Image (cartoon, rainbow, N blue to C red):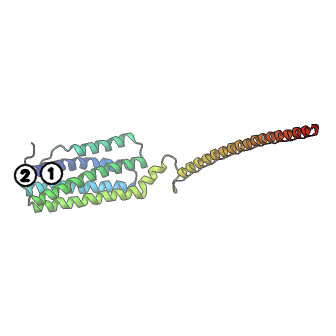
Amino acid sequence: MAAKSLRDLFIEELRDAYDGEKRLLKALPRMARAATNEELQNAFTRHAKETDRQVARLEKVFRAIGESVRGKKCDGIIGIVEEAKAAIDEIEEGAVLDAALIAGGQRAEHYEIAAYGTLAQFADLLGEHGAKDLLGQTLQEEKAADEKLSSIAMSDVNRRALTSDGEEWGGGTGIARGLQGGMRRVAEAMGMANDRGERSGGESVARGGKRSAKRSGGGSSRARGGARAAKRR
């Protein structure tokens, strides 16, 4: 049913969020099992329990505003969950998969942060202050979950994912070696160019000297010719 008022839109968005939370409730335990980083496993497990409470909280919101508790297909979360499943199926277990799981988890958190921020604002405008408070609690939990995933990614997982392809960690030594090699090649090329320039310049000077000598020789011949003419006279 198309929304005809802000209240209609509020209810539709609530149902979208309810369906999304129930889908994440099923996906999070699988993501926890697929992770190899212990801190990441614990984060997904804790958030699954938190998501269970968020589902119950949404049910309270429905009852508070006098609406039946039911969801509406949440295409956004469906897509995010499918991407996480594909990562688990396609990427070898290890740090790279952990990084992919964090990326998927944060996509879900960002989606929910936007959803709950909007819902809390709608509830406030509609005078549903009890609903606003409940939605605000969930909003803060989603922000905290996102920050936790960022912390795990930046402190450990992303670095391990970087080194899993054979690169050494330690300030980018592999990159540094590549840059040094490139600089050597540039220096060698510049040296060769200088050598060619010097040889070319030397040859030009030599040719110029020969021409000057010829011109000087011509002047001497003319001088000798003038002296002979003077004797004949």
- Residue 10 point in image, percent of width and height: 12, 52
| Image-quadrant location for residue 218 | top right
Asked whether 30 or 78 is in front, the reply is 78
Instruction: Give the position of the N terminus as an image quadrant.
Output: top left
With respect to residue 210, does 170 lie above or below? below
- For label 1, the SS is helix
- Residue 231 point in image, percent of width and height: 94, 39
Q: Residue furthest front?
A: 233
Instruction: Give the position of the C terminus as an image quadrant.
Output: top right
**Residue drawn at the location 33% of the way across and 59% of the way down:** 148
**Residue drawn at the location 48% of the way across and 48% of the way down:** 164
Q: Is 53 left or right of 69, judged from the image as shown?
A: right
Q: Is 89 left or right of 176, judged from the image as shown?
A: left
Q: Is 214 left or right of 82, judged from the image as shown?
A: right
Q: Is residue 187 visible?
A: yes
Which numbered disc, 2 or 1, marks the residue closer to the eye?
A: 1
Residue type at the position of mark 2: Glu
Residue type at the position of mark 1: Leu
With respect to residue 135, does 224 lie above or below? above
Q: Which mark is residue 168?
A: none
Q: Which residue is mark 2?
A: 67
Q: Which residue is mark 1?
A: 14
Q: How packed is label 2: few (under 14 Cα within 10 Å), some, or many (20 or more)?
A: few
Q: Is residue 94 visible?
A: no
User: CB of mark 2 within 8 Å of CB of mark 1?
Assistant: yes
- Residue 111 point in image, percent of width and height: 25, 51
Circle count? 2
- Say which label, 2 or 1, has the lower sequence index: 1
